[in-house]
Image (tube, helix red, strand yellow):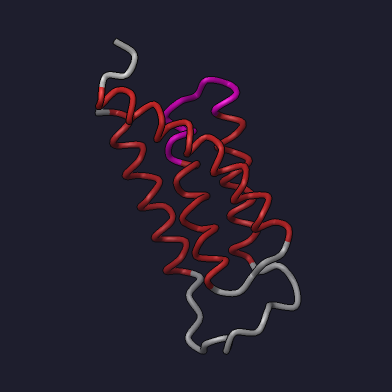
Amino acid sequence: MLATASFAFGILLAAIILAVTRRHEPQMGRPAPKPANLGWWTLAFGMIAITAFALSAWFISIAFAFAAVLVGVGTLKRHDRHWPTWVGLGTGLAPAIAWIAFAAGSIFGFGE
């Protein structure tokens, strides 16, 4: 139950960040000249997720891993392909994949 709440919190956090940083005028497909704030948010969320995973703070890791992945994908869709976006997406994706694997194992009973 707590893991589900952490997952929902991560999605809600990403939705809020993406909504607050939404631009009203489109970028017309050209890359941004410097990293945008969303790239830095992605990096921060990814670093928090991987650090929490390493320190066994499971519920923090779940929330920030999925927030990093969603904000990272949103950042890439807005044509910000600078290093903070890629590093944040990678560091958030590592624990997110682990949590998805743990959930699949729990649901399908692979460990029994």
Quarter of the image for residue 100 reads: top left
Q: Give x and y (percent) for residue 6.
A: 36, 37
Quadrant of res 41: bottom right
Answer above or below: position of 100 versus 72: above
**Which residue is the extreme one toward the top?**
112
Task: Quarter of the image for the C terminus: give it.
Answer: top left
Residue 88 lies, with reference to residue 53, above or below; the image says below
Q: Residue at x 43, y 40 (%)?
A: 63
**Rendered residue at 62%/48% (across/down):** 44
Taking the magenta stretch, the answer to whether it contains residue 32 is no
Q: Position of residue 16 (x, y in %)?
A: 41, 60
Per the picture, the main secondary structure of the magenta-coloured stretch is: helix
Q: Quadrant of the N terminus?
A: top left
**Residue positioned 61% across, 74% down in the render:** 79
Q: Which residues are magenta?
A: 53-63
Q: Nearer the viewer, residue 87 or 111?
A: 111
Residue depicted at x 52% and y 87% = 26
Q: Position of residue 14 (x, y in %)?
A: 43, 55
Number of labels in the image equals 0
Q: Quadrant of residue 50?
A: top right
Side of 6 where 24 appears, left or right: right
Q: Is residue 72 left or right of residue 5?
A: right
Viewer-side residue, 41 vs 53: 53
**Residue 49 position (above or below residue 53):** below
